[in-house]
Image (spheres, rainbow, N blue to C red):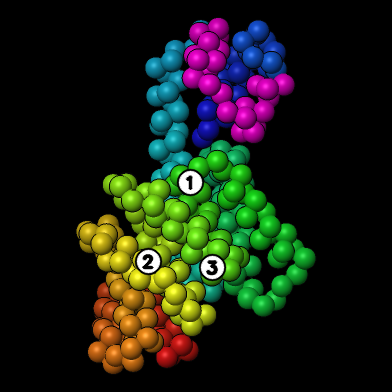
Amino acid sequence: MTIGELLRDYRIKKEKKQKEFVGNIISPSYYSKIEKNKHQISASDLIKILHYNNISITEFFSNFNQADKQNQSLIEKISNLMTEAYYQVNKDKMRNLKKIVQNSDLSKTNKEEQILMIDGFIELLNGNQRSNHSEEIRKKLKEKIFSIPNFNLNKLMLYCNAMRFYNLSDNKLISKNIIHQFSDSENLDIIKRILAIIINILIFSIENEDFKDINFFINTANNIPTNPDLFFYKNVSLFFINFIQYKIYKDKSSLKRCDSIIYFFHSTQMTEYADELSKFKNIHK
């Protein structure tokens, strides 16, 4: 939930029109865009509006933080289900996920973002079956990503899922900027997204037989410490790093390490991922 959406909730509960809610603090037209997340509100104006409406600042931010945590948790679950449906090449599961999102308690903005991502995944599953609708979805995803002023967790998720809609050189440029921005981050959710972005770069590089500047991404992935939360991402990145070593140097020991990672995923009952990696290896070997 955004600050604008929470302000709207408080205003509706108090049964006030926008002009009544803001008084002479800011113009009603500007405030209207704050509720729609088209404008940001300054801290001083926010506090004035809360005081003007006898809303506790502590209560407001407590509700904001709680709603934000619940939203992020639900978004993370939906994202995992999207990824699972994508690897299973299951469009029906994707469509059912849209219904789950529409009936969820997510804010209107978050619902729109999640549905847009699901539509993007469906377009990826459509492959070469492009249509005017496909181009519209891709355009919307790109516009949505760059309408968010700075990279945050939501923007990272959007970008990661829309990387197929950019060319390799643009992806490398955007990804490098992201990695530099979050080089000191200790947030595990952000680090997961960074690894996912690097994995996509490695995949696209293999598909395009273009390994220029690839060491930057390999070194970044290798320098991220392994822990239980990152174990899956580190193993997947290791698979593609070894596969690139095989492609560049024809090092068969690297290919064997790829097979070991596939075996590991099979043995831990992550068969969809194991099958996808095996299929990828056989196609690009």
Residue denoted by label 3: 169
Point out which mark residue 217 bears: 2
Location of residue 97 (image quadrant): bottom right
Q: Looking at the picture, which amino acid does disc 3 mark?
A: Ser
Extreme residue in the front direction: 212
Tell me if residue 45 comes above or below residue 104 in the rendering.
above
Give the secondary structure at mark 2.
helix
Q: Is residue 121 visible?
A: no
Q: In this view, does 153 lie to the left or right of 33?
A: left
Where are the magenta residues, as a range?
29-53
Question: In which quadrant of the rendered view does residue 212 lie?
Answer: bottom left
Residue at position x 53%, y 21% in the image = 42
**Mark 1–mark 2 distance (CA, rounded to whole Å):** 19 Å
Residue kind at label 2, given as amino acid type: Phe
The answer for how far apart the CA atoms under marks 2 and 3 are is: 13 Å
**x 54%, y 70%: residue:** 168
